[in-house]
Image (tube, rainbow, N blue to C red):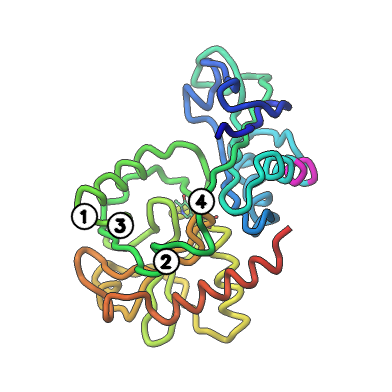
Amino acid sequence: MSRIVYVNGVFLPEAEATVSIFDRGFLMADAVYEVTAVVEGKLIDFDGHVRRLGRSLSELGMENPLDADDLLGLHREIVERNVLEEGLVYLQITRGVADRDFAYPEAATPTVVLFTQVKPLSENDQAKTGIRVVSVDDQRWGRRDIKTVQLLYPSMAKMEARARGADDAWLVQDGLVTEGTSNNAYIVKGGAIITRHLSNDILHGITRAAVLRYARERQMKIEERPFSIEEAQAADEAFITAASTFVMPVVAIDGKILGDGTPGPVARRLRAIYLDEGRKAAI
Ligand code: PLP
């Protein structure tokens, strides 16, 4: 089935959608993106994604061509046109088309692209078994707080993880875990949820913010600080969060099995809370 996608003001079949070879998103990775989960045809944590998009654009000196209402309208329309019940909406905004130059063009019209992906989110087989991660040196650039499309290093790290028999990589800088290739990383020890504090070293996950808020509301203990792979391997349990996975248990780190090798109670509880609260707040 061919999807209906959105490019610069027009909804059209995916095979007919085109972007210029001079687009700075293509030539320079001069573009930002957001991925929003859809459950029961509704958008999860949408306001958070809109806010972060605005911040990413402003950090790169790009105008936001769409206000929050435009964005909501486009997201809803693409969900409707594709009859998307559960999955993801991908949105990308590039600086636009200009002759190739390192300097930003004086005036360029941003390119806006949206498409959908069907994905099982609420009932996900991996969430039942948990995933295995391996550590990989974090060689990304220093502004990971900006959600740009320069995703080659995370792709390489993911492929290294696959080659080593794991599902994903946890990236390590100066002996401490930053985050996963496309998710935030957590461990649980003695009931405390431990995750790296916000800085330019990690993406400020929208799912992270929501999960920590729900955990705090339930008086669960949270420590926002870095942790090492050794500390993670000695933890009671571990998990990741992202819009594309929600709360996903981690059952092995660099081959060390955590607990009894099945998803831990805190990760399972947070996943259930996130699904429940996410659905309630979905728009
Ligand atoms: N960290 C990185 C590097 C990511 O790419 C992502 C999502 O793509 C996340 C964290 C999780 O962010 P969110 O919860 O907003 O999906």
Task: Give the SS element for disc 2.
Answer: helix
Q: Are marks 3 and 2 in contact (CB under 8 Å)?
A: no
- Report the amino acid beneath label 3: Val
Left or right: where 69 falls relative to 27: right
Left or right: where 257 falls relative to 88: left
Camera-nearest residue between 201 and 278: 278
Label 1 vs label 3, nearer the camera: 1
The local crowd at label 3, few if under 14, some if 14 to 19, many if 20 or more residues have their Cα within 10 Å, is some
Tell me the residue that label 2 is attached to. Answer: 127
65 vs 72: above or below: above
The percent position of residue 140, horizontal first and vertical second, equals 37, 44
Image quadrant in which the N terminus is located: top right
Q: Are marks 3 and 4 in contact (CB under 8 Å)?
A: no
User: At 56% across and 16% down in the image, what residue appears?
Assistant: 20
Label 1 vs label 2, nearer the camera: 2
Tell me the residue that label 4 is attached to. Answer: 119
- Label count reads 4
Label 3 vs label 2, nearer the camera: 2
- Report the amino acid beneath label 2: Ala
Tell me the residue that label 1 is attached to. Answer: 165
Image quadrant in which the C terminus is located: bottom right
- Report the amino acid beneath label 4: Lys
Say whether disc 1 or disc 2 marks the residue closer to the N-terminus.
2
Judge whether residue 72 is colored magenta. yes
Tell me the residue that label 3 is attached to. Answer: 172
Write down the region rendered in magenta: 69-73
The local crowd at label 2, few if under 14, some if 14 to 19, many if 20 or more residues have their Cα within 10 Å, is many
